Image (cartoon, rainbow, N blue to C red):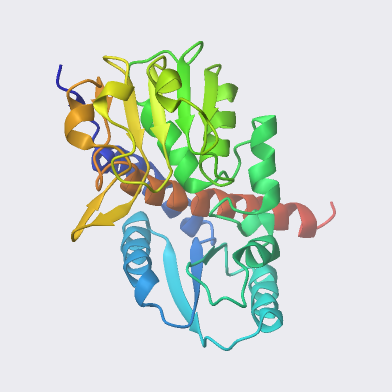
């Protein structure tokens, strides 16, 4: 068996066409979506991500402003910057770029972004809403991975799913998202005794750990879908968490790295930007509408 390669770029392109149309409608109504990216200190590590986000934002009809602050800025100062952006109706979404200096905890900044402008879906309330199957502004990577699986000819209800990795922003949200779709979910982590026992029983496997080659073909059920979310640099190449060659011989569908989950993640970010803009438009209209 040779797996069908899932084209994340094609999925992203379909999503972006819809996003661009909705962004145009909002702009015509006087609410052109606008994102502000925040990075601190040496931006070399995040520069590629920022450039990619800006390029995709322009393609989606979303304005994008990249701001960089000196590495010695205090947490209090940066929190003040975010408070200003939260209050600015011209800013519809805020992105916190990683990495950050050691004295700036990323969670503190994620909490400081107002939930209605949390286009990354990283605010505790955005993560928590998934438990209630409220996906208003969900975490982009987790939502993207599930969107990819939904694009396959598989019935989500009753699907046996294995999630390898239980991070707060990817693994756990995927598990809740899939349960919300009616799947039966097993979550594996570093204390799971026999990961292969669980992954071989699954119709779909998500892996997001950060260990290249972690999942091999003998860990998969023949014909299963493999959604590889890992991003690792090995000998100058970008690879995922799966041993692609052996997994492609067993799986029914497989995401490449790069070109799989990544492009769809950026599309979800842009979709969140447009959705956040619409939410803010409705909020301001309800709050400040003239009494009749």
Residue 150 in sight in this render? no
Residue 259 in sight in this render? yes
Expressed as whole percent of the image width and height from the top left, the position of residue 93 reads 55, 61
Out of 71 and 245, give the one closest to the viewer.
245
Expressed as whole percent of the image width and height from the top left, the position of residue 115 reads 67, 55
Q: Is residue 167 left or right of residue 14?
A: right
Q: Is residue 82 left or right of residue 259?
A: right
Residue that lies at the very extreme toward the front in this rendered image: 193
Expressed as whole percent of the image width and height from the top left, the position of residue 240 reads 30, 45
Circle count: 0
Out of 67 and 252, give the one closest to the viewer.
252
Which of the 4 quarters of the picture holds residue 74? bottom right
On screen, 159 above or below 211? Answer: above
Which of the 4 quarters of the picture holds residue 226? top left
On screen, 292 above or below 67? Answer: above
Q: Quadrant of the N terminus?
A: top left
Expressed as whole percent of the image width and height from the top left, the position of residue 27 reads 47, 59
Residue in the picture at 25% in, 22% down: 251
Q: Is residue 23 left or right of residue 222?
A: right
């Amino acid at each position: 068996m040779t797996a069908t390669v899932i084209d994340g770029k094609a999925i992203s392109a379909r999503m972006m066409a819809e996003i661009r149309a909705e962004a145009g409608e909002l702009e015509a109504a006087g609410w052109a979506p606008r994102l502000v990216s925040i990075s601190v200190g040496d931006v070399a590590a995040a520069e590629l991500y920022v450039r990619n986000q800006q390029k995709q934002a322009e393609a989606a009809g979303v304005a994008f402003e990249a701001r960089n602050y000196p590495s010695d800025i205090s947490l209090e100062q940066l929190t003040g910057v975010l408070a200003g952006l939260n209050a600015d109706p011209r800013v519809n979404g805020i992105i916190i770029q990683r990495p950050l200096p050691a004295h700036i905890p990323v969670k503190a900044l994620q909490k400081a972004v107002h939930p209605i402008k949390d286009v990354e879906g990283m605010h505790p309330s955005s993560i928590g809403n998934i438990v209630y199957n409220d996906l208003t502004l969900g975490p982009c990577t987790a939502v993207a991975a599930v969107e990819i699986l939904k694009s396959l000819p598989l019935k989500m209800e009753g699907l046996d799913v294995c999630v390898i990795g239980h991070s707060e922003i990817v693994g756990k949200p995927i598990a809740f998202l899939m349960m919300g779709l009616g799947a039966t979910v097993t979550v594996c982590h570093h204390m799971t005794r026999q990961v292969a026992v669980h992954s071989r029983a699954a119709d779909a496997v998500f892996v997001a750990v950060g260990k290249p080659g972690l999942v091999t073909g003998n860990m998969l059920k023949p014909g299963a879908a493999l959604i590889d979310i890992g991003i690792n640099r090995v000998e100058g190449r970008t690879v995922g968490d799966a041993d692609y060659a052996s997994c492609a011989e067993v799986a029914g569908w497989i995401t490449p790295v790069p070109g799989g989950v990544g492009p769809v993640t950026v599309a979800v970010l842009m979709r969140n930007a447009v959705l956040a803009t619409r939410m803010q438009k409705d909020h301001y209209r309800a709050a400040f509408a003239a009494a009749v």
